[in-house]
Image: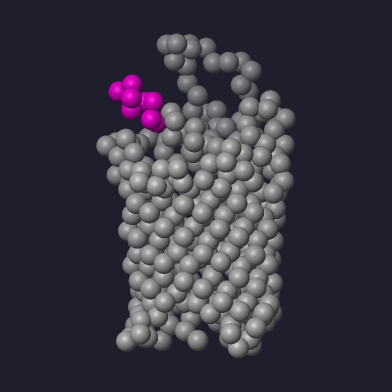
Amino acid sequence: MKKFLKYILIAAVASTYGQELNLPTWTQYLADNEFVISPTYAGIGDNLRVRINGLTQWVGIKDAPDNQSFYIDARISNRSGVGISAYNDKNGNTLQKGAKFSFAHHIVLHYYTKQFLSFGLSYNINSFKIDINNFQPTPEMPILDPAVTDDRAINNHNFDLGFLYRYKDFFFSFNANNILPKDIDNFNGLEPNVLSNYQVYTGLVMRDVQNKNIEYEPSVFFQLLGSDGRSATDVNFKYRKYTRGDDYYWVGLSYRFLNDQFFKPLNVGPMAGIMKSKMYFAYSYQITTNDLIGYNSGTHMITIGLDFLQGISDCPCTKSKINKF
């Protein structure tokens, strides 16, 4: 029992810091919604795209992290796009809510070789607090600290910057999240003030030679925390098949590991999704491979969405990677 409580404590502390550093990134971006990780994807694809995501981590463990998020992005001209994302994240007695307002501009580097470059900027506002309503006296502490009289809430304003390069079916994006330090006065300096989070997402869409309705998409997602230098990598693979028109379905697999522990994955799991008449649904399951595996049934994520008001842009720089040229 002591060993189990030790793992819970370590995992909770790690998740709390990760929660404040940035919206937790699992495999939401693989649900054909790269706007999750970078503002540079705003306006790429259909004219208006909506995604709603729900994630429950470590199902079976009390007060495990739980997250809901909403994304919408749209093209506002042939070469520009805007987007808004909002989220609610709960981890035990820590609560965080926030929103991002994004703008992206896409340019053509070379029309005939299909080389495009995109730049993105997001303004972020986050509200982080500790919920004291669940604090109860214990035999070890029969009287609660009288100094704890509020929710210790604090708001933080920040920015993300990113760029995206595409060459035919290859893509490479870099994003710097939370580039400004955080005001920590209300926490007496106990929390990290460096919130920077650097992310690289790259991959290739390969079309089957014999069946052009089939695509293979290997990709890699790398994350580096500026506060302490921790980093992790996702190695992903997706199989996509078009059925009729723009309808398709896909299946995939994701493997996440700390970069100094390649053979000790943090999470491994399958995922699948379908687009039908502009309605979208995806499901992802992540198996926790550390010692907590005996106490939970994994992490479950559902994404639902809708693409509508579709308008074909005159500029190929706003074409989605999953739209056939």
Question: Chief secondary structure of the magenta span?
Answer: helix
- 153 above or below 39? above
Quarter of the N terminus within the rendering: top left
* Foreground of the two, 289 or 92: 289
Q: What residue lies at 55% left-to-right and 28% top-to-bottom?
A: 132
**Which of 26/116 is in front?**
116
172 relative to 273 in the view: left or right? right
Expressed as whole percent of the image width and height from the top left, the position of residue 215 reads 38, 77
Q: Residue at x 63, y 23 (%)?
A: 149
| Image location (x, y in percent) of residue 72 | 57, 66
Can you see residue 260? Answer: yes
Which of the 4 image quadrants contains residue 193? Answer: top right
Colouring: one colour
Left-right relation of 125 to 270: right
| Nearer to me, 222 or 319 | 222
Looking at the image, is 42 positioned above or below residue 113?
Answer: above
Tally the marks: 0
Q: Is residue 249 left or right of residue 16?
A: left
213 up-or-down from 8: above or below: below
Quarter occupied by residue 105: bottom right
Task: Write down the region rendered in magenta.
Answer: 1-8
Question: Is 17 a magenta residue?
Answer: no
Where is residue 159? Give x, y as percent. Answer: 70, 53
Give me the residue at 36% from left, 43% from top.
Answer: 264
